[in-house]
Image (spheres, rainbow, N blue to C red):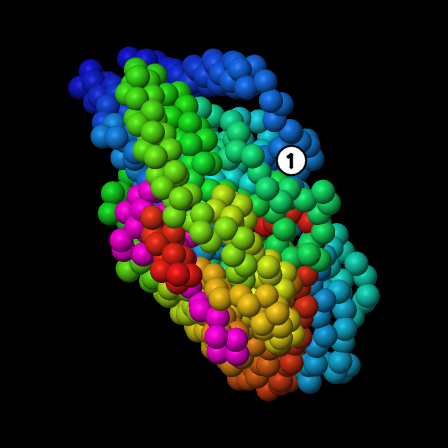
Amino acid sequence: MKNKINTLIIAFMLMMTNVFAGAIRVVTTTQDLKSIAQLIGGDKVDAFGIATGYQNPHFVDPKPSYIIKLSNADLFVTVGLDLETGWSPSLLGSSRNPKIQKGSPGYVDASIGVQLQQVPSSINRGEGDIHIYGNPHYWLDPVNGKQIARNICDGLTRISPENKAFFESNLKSFNETLDQKIKVWNAQMLKYKGTKVIAYHNEWCYFENRFGLQIVDFLEPKPGIPPTPSQLVKIIGEVKSNSIRLIISSPYFTTSSSDVVAKQTGAKVLTLATSVGAFDSIKNYFDLFDYNINQLINTLK
Amino acid sequence: MIRKILIFPVWLLFAHHSIGQVDSLASDSLLLLQIQSQLQNNTPIPAQPRTSPSNNPDMSVIGDFRTTYQDNQNRHFDANLAETEFSFQSVIDPYAKADFFYSVSRDAASGEFKGEIEEGYLSTLSLPFHLQLKAGKFKQQLGKINSLHGHAISFIDKPNAYVRFFGEEGMNDEGLSLSWLLPNPVFFQELTIEETDGPRESPSFSRSTGNHYLTLIHLKNFWDLTANATLELGLTGITGVNYTEKSTQIGAVDLTYKWKPVQMNTYKSFTFQNELYWSRATFDSTEVNALGFYSLASVQVAKRWFLTGRYDYTNKPSSAKFVEQAYSATLGWYATEFQKIELQGKFTSANEADEENNFKKEFTQVLLRWVFVIGSHGAHQY
């Protein structure tokens, strides 16, 4: 009898420790990171992205159902730079999973090595939602996609060193495809270099600098503060004096204030995709830029 | 044989240590890769830290300033800094994290400031089998409101049933809390067992002078009904002794429905939340069965505006004959994540005159509070 119990206990323990056998379970905070993890990990990974593509990644509700995903994850990939500070630390703390805690091999900060923009020299909440380490929307520059992919590839290799060659080869083809695409995107946007635009929230600086747009002002008077009537008056003046034709918004902001400016000035409001999955046609990281650049060209031409 | 079984958990701990060793090797090779690539590039990358290079814990201070009108008090108007909370939170080492909340509150009548450790506990991060252990003084896993700090709820006063059964501070005892994430593939289930010393100031429970302690069991069930809607059902059982050193048992049920559209989640939301407490207490020779509950609906009418309505019904744990009901409405304006103003109107009626309410059976209260936070960004609760 005792023997049987012992065998059962051993079997149970082996079951618990050998859940590894299948695909590497990757949980990412955003859909962009999920897409890149899938492109690098191929069929060796089973990836889940927490924030949907049309959701504001600053404000995700830490639902307990995400804890289940994290408790079984082998790799956790985060955008970092405090983008997810309101929700991912509490989820990680409740995950009971030592493999993916900050500092563990299964924790990947995708921002490592990325040249950050808008790093503040001083911090003052009076300036609104300022990110103390720099603007966190760096995945919107496709060149940074290469560094994100490198970080994810390193993370996957730490978890599964036997598949190193596979991940590296996928990384190589990801970079090659991206390089080709970047050439095309740059060529498409060349004509519109220096185009002045207005944006709703300060989340486009990496995209702006890569493709030569010039964001003149934001509808939010300060990051995270909803548009005020006086700000709209200021924007309307700027749109008129600079002959601005375009206001860029994101899927998770109402366009009511942008529409007011559009009505007063004739500028067009364009909701661009901030992440993979923002619109149905955006299935992966490459589609994200295909979509946004096509939308921009169609509106500006 | 039995010894072999006992050895297993020890072996598991060591197994986890060996994972830690792999960690350092992997990060070493990562460092080496980074050094190599930087040497190849020759262009120095300016230092851009991703996390704060400081050993200080995350710190914040929360102020809760209130002005009140109460016609059940001799002095009708009052203004006071009801609570100042200092929080310090950090990971201790790779195995655990710590949370401390020091709260200073002021008694409006006496004017005295009273400081206390509201919470101070360690939580493990590396126990096997999806277990998590808390040790210290912590808000216990009773229903929904108890685990939240006062400034985090969408109304100003605590529900009458909660205050009558557990006191203003609620169940916030010292001891151990072990929670287990059940391996349920269909929905979230968490079982928590807490063994604590026995609270010092609580209408239902007391710290025994003998060998009686407080045991609490909580089962949390959580379903994603759709991408935008969730349902939570919590079941709690508590057993301990009351001030007469006789036993008190409390059963509690909490049911919360939340709707929050994923895409526009900062603009619109709706919450329907209910908690019911039922207590069986023996006082000397008599047994009292008492009931209390609240039911609330909260609507986010615009990005910054929240409207909450609540109905309270309660007995006292010491008297089932006493019945108190209250109706309240709260309007909240959330300026940013760091500041909010709430205005609450409340009408209470009871069938017996009560000393705490200045022997008034019916009275009205108007509460206004301003909550403000400085310091590190706190986590949101769901």
- Residue A250 location in percent, x, y? 44, 59
Q: Going by the picture, which residue comes out furthest to the front?
A: A191
| Quadrant of res A142 | top left
Q: Is residue A45 visible?
A: yes
Residue in the picture at 42% in, 43% down: A186
* B152 within the magenta span: no
| Quadrant of res B265 | bottom left
Q: Which residue is mark 1?
A: B52
- Residue B175 location in percent, x, y? 55, 40
Residue in the picture at 61% in, 26% down: B45
Residue sitting nearer the eye, B114 or B247: B114
Q: Is residue B196 left or right of residue A68?
A: right
- Residue B290 location in percent, x, y? 45, 68
Residue sitting nearer the eye, A244 or A261: A244
B128 up-or-down from B6: above or below = below
- Label 1 resides on the chain identified as B
Residue in the picture at 45% in, 36% down: A143
- Residue A258 location in percent, x, y? 50, 70
- Secondary structure type for disc 1: loop
Residue in the picture at 48% in, 46% down: A211
A92 up-or-down from B186: above or below = above
Q: Of the residues shown, which amino acid type is indicated by label 1?
A: Ser
Count of numbered badges drawn on the protein: 1
Q: Is residue A171 left or right of residue A101?
A: left
**Which corner quadrant holds the C terminus of chain A?**
bottom left
A264 up-or-down from B194: above or below = below
Mark 1 residue crowding within 10 angstroms, few (<14) / some (14–19) / many (20+) = few
Q: Which residues are magenta?
A: A263-289
